[in-house]
Image (cartoon, rainbow, N blue to C red):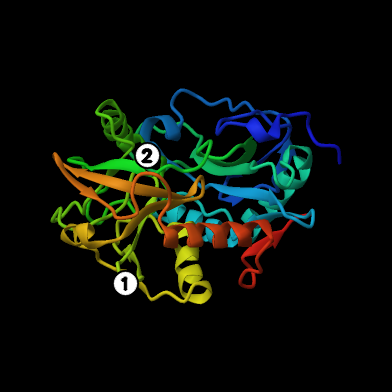
Amino acid sequence: MEKKNLDWANLGFGYVVADYRYVSKFKDGKWDDGEITTDATITLNECAGVFQYSQSCFEGLKAYTTEDGHIVCFRPDLNAARMKDSCERLEMPVFPEDRFVEAVEKVVKANEAWVPPYGSGATLYIRPFMIATNSVIGVKPAVEYEFRIFVTPVGPYFKGGAKPLTIRVSDFDRAAPHGTGHIKAGLNYAMSLHAIVDAHNKGFDENMYLDPATRSKVEETGGANFIFITKDGKFVTPKSDSILPSITRRSLMVVAEKYLGLTVEHREVLFSEVSDFAECGLCGTAAVISPVGKINDHGKEICFPSGMDEMGPVTKKLYDTLTGIQMGTIEGPEGWVHKIL
């Protein structure tokens, strides 16, 4: 299929309207068969549950063109499972996991012309989401829902390479104890917007959130999990019931142990330990790994030995190995790379 006439190498990370999207509706206790449509518009009543009580959740993954010309995506089964967890927590109907993966395949195939070519540095970002659609005025779950997937071609999250970030220890809490921090609910991101705008206004790239109960342990940022490298080469990542289980982070744990031979520790991380680490990064679908060079704790700076110029050496190996697996230049564990075309 002939590709769209886009300047692939200079795409930003933004929304471009592609030709097709997938839609399935839940009504009378069941999902319909779903369809591929060209209509990017959603028409809802003003009293729809998504507007009144924020019943919405979403996922994010990417499709890539590999070196040998195939179109693939990365571990979509984990996105399906995580969306199941989000739906159950928000009293929304689960979109079946097998149908989730099939829907991803259908919408990527339909938009094959929008999948960037190998070597362009661009990818096709895939956004599945679900919203409550019927009118709800009393505080209760809706009874009708819409599951949709749209795609958009995107360039690298960081143009010109990922320069180490400067982040701050936030005075805001990202999630409540026993709350919704472990699911990918739209409401979690809404409450983080003030904190990130405030951070940007004060010259910081991101926030470091501490645990809401004791404010002594590292949790995550508004949209990414933390990874640390110790001075003796161990891979450490925080563990908490209120951290979103990042698919990228879980994959990096395997890469660290199985490909790089590192000792992996998934455990509670005290903030008092952070100054002893050699490298720090934020991991997620969009950028894979964003290196952190400096943390500001209310005026006191923690500067990592890896510096402010480039990724630390171990973080760079993790990044190169995982992206190599995603792009097909390194053989990944069975089932990680899901072939679509």
Residue most extreme to the right: 1
Horizontal and vertical percent position of residue 63: 66, 49
Residue 218 vs residue 193, the one in the foreground = 218
Q: Residues within 10 Å of mark 2 (few under 14, many from 20)?
A: some
- 281 left or right of 303 in image: right
Reply above or below: 225 against 17. below
| Residue 274, placed above or below residue 24 | below
Viewer-side residue, 94 vs 301: 301
Q: Is 55 placed above or below 103 here?
A: above
Which secondary structure lies at badge 1? loop
Distance of mark 2 from mark 1, alpha carbons? 35 Å
Image position, residue 329 (x, y; %) = 68, 62
SS at mark 2?
helix
Q: Amino acid at mark 2?
A: Tyr
Residue 229 occupies quadrant:
bottom left
Front in this rendered view, residue 88 or 151: 151
- Furthest residue in direction top, as rendered: 46
Q: Position of residue 36 (x, y in %)?
A: 73, 40
Residue at point 68%, 50% (across, down): 64
- Please name which of the two marks, 2 or 1, marks the residue nearer to the observer: 1
Q: Amino acid at mark 1?
A: Asp
- Name the residue at 28% across, 55% down: 219
Quadrant in the rendering for residue 129: top right
Q: Which mark is residue 222?
A: none
Q: Give the side of residue 8 with respect to residue 294, left or right.
A: right
Q: Mark 1 sits on what residue?
A: 232
Residue at 70 percent across and 46 percent down: it is: 119
Q: Is there a contact, CB below 8 Å, between mark 2 and mark 1? A: no
Instruction: Identify residue for label 2.
Output: 189
